[in-house]
Amino acid sequence: MSQNYLIGVGIADITGEAGGVGMMGMARAQQITKGIHNRQWARAFVIGDNTDDNSGKRILFVNTDLGQLFESVYHEVIGRLGEQFGDRYTDQNTVISATHTHSGPGGSAHALLYNLTIGGFRPDTFEAIVAGIVEACVRADADVAPGDISIAVGELHGASVSRNLFQFECNPEDEQKLFPAANDPQMTQLKFERDGKAVAGLNWFSVHGTSMTNRNTLISADNKGYASYLWEHDWAGQASVAKAQGEYNFVAAFAQSSAGDMSPNVGAGTAYGPTDDMFENTRVIGSRQAVKAKELFDSATEELTGPVDFRQRYLDFSHIDVAAKWTPNGKDTRTWPAVLGQAFMAGCYDGAGVPFVKQGQMDRVKILKLLDHTMVKVPDHVAAGHAPKPIGIATGLMSPPWTSQVISIQVLRVGQLAIVVVPAEFTIVAAHRARAAVQDALAGQVSHVVLAGYANDYTGYVVTPEEYMIQRYESASTHFGPATLPAYQQELAALATAIADGTPTPSTATPPDLSESRFSTSSTLAMPVAIVANRKLNAAAIHRADTQLNPDKTKPKQRFGDVLTQPNAGYSVGDEVVAEFVGTHPNNNQRRGSTFLEVQQKQGTEWSTILTDDDWSTKFEWKQKPNHRSVVKVRWAITRDTEAGMYRVRYLGDALKADGSTKPVVGTSREFSVR
């Protein structure tokens, strides 16, 4: 092998609070975390020029099992990486992308809109995410060594479907013909090798992380998370207990691309399918991605060769002048301060919103008109700029803005591959135009272009100007008006041209620091203990409030860890083991890099942990009873590969005492047989 690049990979746990925290994605206040089905992970990839003096350029790409990657997390990670590595990894060459699961705890944003249904900023979840991402990056940096990267591109059918066909059909016929089934089946797979041994895979495919519905309350990495689990655990033989401790032999990342209008619910594009069970749907759609990715991985023969390069710029998208070259009507135009249309509140087929607004409804509803007197009134010229969008929430006109307006865009080059990095959900035709703009600017230098969405921040959706006209959910959620996509095309092309010409791309704006204006809630109770305006409430202050309000308690004559429901004496393959324990609040300690449960097998006179709360066959369920009492239920679905023998289930937690300290809790079930 030619060892064209330096490569390094790393993985770390980023799971936040598993008890009583609003989930990020569906915007349903009643959808709060009540346990874990599988954990959330950060998977980091370092790619650099392999030079004799180690002076070549590097990029750092991190894929995270998150709903969105907010600017708050991104800049905290960049700051901590700077403390360790100086200018090796900066906002110029670092990408942190989210898979867009809708089943993780929220509260990691500083921008207010994304914390409204969560109950506020969650310091503990924020810290778990940031610390885990940094840990994955540190591991990847320590792993750097010469190696090779190969690429393969193919098509996966049956794992995605258009959830807004009416919107797609607004586009010109020649573009519709590029996507005959109204979806984008393209999958791009990278293969990382050292000395002929495969060490990692990085995949891009467009499909929403909504196989788990808005009824789910268990933390889940959704279909892309299952694809990673299947490859790493089942195919690479990597135990979850070892991975959590930073011991891994293969890293499989399934990154998000242009999933704006791509649903995994292939049952006619509704919130059902391919079955009526959301856990099975997650497994099926994840499996289909993994199987196709492995096929491409095994057949990848085209080596990436050529330089590593990158360009990045911060831009204020509330006002970008867009040249006529990029607009469908051939006229100069501009973007506008962020305004969400009323159809944003209607939701989509994957998750319905409020009942008083419908997708495509062009007459403004009365309740929103009433809000004009209590919120910011949108000036007539801004409303005209967003037309025909009926005004919903003018997030960009709030003080401070409720959503990001100064955002980062990037173009990365690795040999003949260009990675287009955007902080939004692009529809498939919008992504096609963005990729084409970069491809044209790098003509002759790259032959593959992939769009990496949901990266470095989150600014809603991006649709084509034609799609924008009918104001469905995605177009109402396009923040900066009908010229949003043309602005992206123009500015991404400029970055790509700078790579081709070797010129710099200085930023034209600086993101504001919103950490002082966020509002927070209790990190243990799903209820406010403080709403903070114009000042920062840190994790220590939140923790002090918790110690006064919520020490864990038990019933008389019970102890933490006592078994309330013992497993049966014996089970067979296909059965489900259930054990209940006197528990504690899981937010006392997220047990990042650890687990709340263990399934142990008896080996001689010793017990060996074979499964944790990250494994697909287990579930950790938490329920809070009156007077701050908790009951924990551990489930284990016995799979076909389970060896006959003796087993037991353990629960691991931490009890919060009245003085604010914690003490470890362990509960152990009786032994039972599996035959």
Image (cartoon, rainbow, N blue to C red):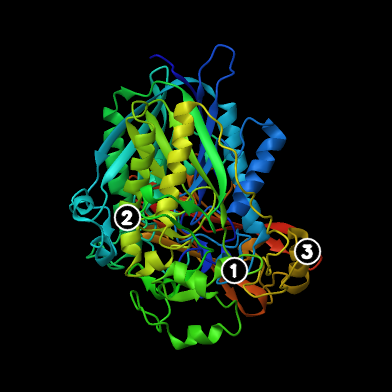
Comparing 396 with 323, the one in front is 323
Front: mark 3 or 1: 1
- Measured as percent of width and height from the top left, residue 294 is found at 30, 36
Instruction: Decide if residue 8 is on the left or right side of residue 159.
Output: right
Front: mark 2 or 1: 2
The residue that mark 1 highlights is 397
The residue carrying pointer 3 sits among few (fewer than 14), some (14 to 19) or many (20 or more) residues within 10 Å by Cα, namely: few
Which residue does the image show at 47% across and 30% down from the upper left?
Answer: 499
Cα–Cα gap, marks 2 and 1: 27 Å
Q: Is residue 568 visible?
A: no
Mark 2–mark 1 CB contact (< 8 Å):
no
Which residue does the image show at 70% across and 34% down from the upper left?
Answer: 84
Q: Determine which quarter of the picture holds residue 635.
A: bottom left
In the picture, which quadrant includes the N terminus? top left
Which amino acid, mark 3?
Ala
- Secondary structure state at the residue bearing disc 2: loop
Which residue does the image show at 44% across and 35% down from the upper left?
Answer: 496
Comparing 175 with 570, the one in front is 175
Cα–Cα gap, marks 3 and 1: 31 Å
Comparing 272 with 505, the one in front is 505
- Secondary structure state at the residue bearing disc 1: helix
- Secondary structure state at the residue bearing disc 3: helix
The residue that mark 2 highlights is 328
Q: Earlier in the sequence, mark 3 or mark 1?
A: 1
Q: Residue furthest right?
A: 659
Instruction: Decide if residue 436 is on the left or right side of residue 365.
Output: left
In the displayed structure, would residue 194 be above or below residue 486?
Answer: above
Which amino acid, mark 1?
Leu
The residue that mark 3 highlights is 541
Q: Earlier in the sequence, mark 2 or mark 1?
A: 2
Which amino acid, mark 2?
Pro
